[in-house]
Image (tube, grey):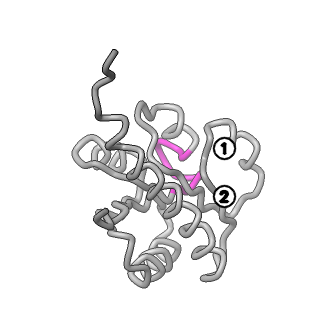
Amino acid sequence: MKNELIRTIIVDDDPIATRVLEEYIRKIETLELVKSCSNGEDALFVLAQNEIDLIFLDMEMPGISGMDMLKTLEVTPFIIITTSKPDYAVEAFEFQVDDYLVKPISPQRFVKAVERIRHEFELRQQMQPIQDQPILI
């Protein structure tokens, strides 16, 4: 099976946090950064135009917050919350987010979260041919 890249976007209004995430993503060969968005509106546009597998999502942003974005997503890619506030964890997990990273995010914790996603992504990729086959009765 071909190893596909995990197509990723960052949604965070903090340029320093965005830069840190971009650096972390560049160091992991299975991730492809499609776009960094500084607000939810831009992110929703990118999601409408691209097939995205993973979103690194900040919770507190002007306009559409991370929580508001979660509520509007029809197709849910993998979601890793990246926030300075641990207060949103319970509500975020109600939307079945895949991980929750509290800033400042250590490289080790970032890698652990991405490894979990990579494993789940590969399982989905393996299941896809089975799901695409017609059912014969």
- Quarter of the picture containing the N terminus is bottom left
- The answer to which image quadrant residue 27 occupies is bottom left
Q: Nearer the viewer, residue 20 or 30?
A: 30
Marks 1,2: beta carbons within 8 A:
yes
Residue type at mark 1: give it.
Answer: Ala
Mark count: 2
Residue 62, magenta (yes or no):
yes
For image coordinates 37% across by 79% down, the residue present is 29
Q: Which residue is mark 1?
A: 92
Residue type at mark 2: give it.
Answer: Tyr
In 3D space, how far apart are the residues under numbered discs 1 and 2 (Cα atoms)? 8 Å
Give above or below for 94 relative to 30: above
First-in-chain label (1 vs 2): 1
Residue 83's spot in the image, x, y percent?
63, 61
Q: Which residue is mark 2?
A: 100
Instruction: Determine whether, in the image, residue 42 is placed left or right of residue 61.
Output: left
Q: Dot 1 lies on which element?
A: helix
